[in-house]
Amino acid sequence: MRSERRRKAAEALRQLGEPGEQVSLESFICMMQLDTIPLRVAAANILREWREYVPLEPLFLAMQDPNKRVRSAAKWALVDVGAHAPQEALHPHLTDPDAEVREAVLYALGTRAPVAMVLEALDVPEQGLCAAATYLIGLLGEHVPVETLLTMLQSRNAHIRVAAARLLGNVEEQRIPLEPLIEALHDPEQSVRLEAIWALAKSGERMPQTELRALLDDTDQLIQREATKVLASAGDPEALSIIVGWLHADHEWARENALVWLRTPLGAVRNAIVQRLPIEELLHLLKDAWWPVGYMAAGMIAMLGENAPFTELHALLSDPLPQARRAALYALAFLGDDVPLSRYIPIESVLIALDTEDIETRRQAAKVLSSFDIPVPVERLLPHLEGENVELAGLIARQGRQEGIDILVANLRTSFRVDYALAVLGELGEQAPSEPLLAELHASDISVRQGVAATLYETHPELLPQLVPELVETLCTGQVGPLLEPLQDIQIAQALAALRSTHPNLLSWFDQALDSPSWEVRMWAIIGSSQMAPHGLEPTIEKLQRLLDDPESASVREAARGALETFARRTATDEHRE
């Protein structure tokens, strides 16, 4: 995703001419500084996480903006902020002439939306508004009479029939109308047929197995698969045999796909299948060499709750195969969310796993320890604390130890472990330091930016009233304040790195950017410099050597290592050619 955005940015810049030729490097940078659209979108993305602290009117105003990206970002901010606003502030906008505004308001109202208006919107020509109504009808199901749903099932519009079939599966088990749904199994639209299968899966002992069994030979493979799952959940021997066959496929991707199929979409069907499958089939998959298979098999085993094979999982913690040990830890971590692990697994066997050389095993052991329902002795954990293991740092931080908090904060300045660090900091409440979070509010990755915003909402809501006005100003006018100014520098570095040009002006720009106070600018300057290898300035190589010990970011250190290896490799290749 990131690389694709960089490629498009680079292509747009190339169309204007190479830096130093038709257009100077300074002109490139000036053009990017004048383009505040990405920053306005970033402001909207942050505001949507701050809910009741954000006024509605600026969002409605931004939805009239001439730029499509700004309007879209404002719409989804309005959806999330409006969900926490009083309905009387939203109702007047249900008659707005702009269909996108009405769509956003319907999403924001959710179950508070007027049923009649939602039903009416199911049949409008505007696709977005129609999609919102289709989604909402699923939330409002209990307020829609079965007779209305049966009429909808006969609609000429497929999306209305889809919504009707889905809702019919949500009525009381004994009231699910079988005949109309059996008829819908043969609808010309695949999505209607699927919803009918899933609705009939909820009909309990009345499930029409004969009609569903006929779908095992259907020409549509997705219909075949979903019918198989539903029948297997009811204990059908043929369907269970088919599923066991999926799990024994020769290719690892086929086994992975089989587990993906079993995990979606209906939890009740999935749980029933797990209860009926021979447990040895799932235990066998924990040893699979392809880690996603072991991971998903662990998730399936965890659905058994207190009926899970704890003795076998405990034994796997000392299995000679590292993938088996990791998968057992995956399963225990999943189980720990609902089951008191101390009743089934001695904590010492998990603590021992912290001594392994494999970092992934150590991380999973820390996750399992986080799920234990008894205190974990912090003195046993501290000797294992390391910068890479955010899971262990989180476990230590939850016990109020600054050593763990420091590791979590350091991982905010990485591009690969920030999500877990944010999750744990969010749990710490006001104990989470605010300054490092505010410093990462301008992260280039949208998911990180929103994650930081959400963490600030959870931990330091008292700061938000001071921050909202600046972001509202950026969204509505493009005037950028201190919160998002650093993001502009990061985006310039990203765009220039994507150019992959060896022009001397760019070499010089990247060399200077290696001294930036922003770790993300330094990282992108490193990436840009490495793409020019073996062309590089001597001071650049010296700076890359120093950045191997960057005090702030592991991502910068890793990028510097990669860049120096690239320079060495390409220099050697050029010398060999000569």
Image (spheres, rainbow, N blue to C red):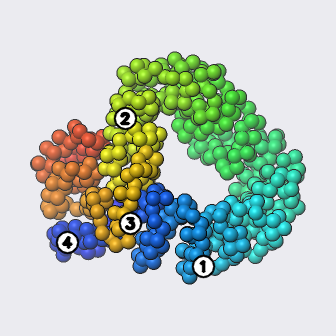
- Horizontal side of residue 370 vs 17, given as left or right: right
Distance between the Cα atoms at labels 1 and 3?
Answer: 25 Å
Q: Which residue is mark 4?
A: 27
Disc with the residue nearer the chain's start (2 vs 4): 4
Instruction: Report x, y in % for residue 249.
Output: 65, 41
Distance between the Cα atoms at labels 1 and 2?
Answer: 49 Å
Element on which disc 2 rests = helix
Instruction: Tell me what residue is drawn at x 70 percent, y 76 percent.
Output: 120
Quadrant containing the N terminus is: bottom left
Distance between the Cα atoms at labels 4 and 1?
Answer: 45 Å
User: Is residue 497 visible in this depiction of the protein?
Assistant: no
Q: Which residue is mark 2?
A: 405
Instruction: Report x, y in % for residue 314.
Output: 59, 21
Disc with the residue nearer the chain's start (2 vs 3): 2
- Horizontal side of residue 289 vs 29, given as left or right: right
Disc with the residue nearer the chain's start (1 vs 3): 1
The outermost residue toward the bottom is 97
- Above or below, 344 relative to 68: above
Q: Which residue is mark 1?
A: 95
Distance between the Cα atoms at labels 2 and 4?
Answer: 43 Å
Disc with the residue nearer the chain's start (1 vs 2): 1
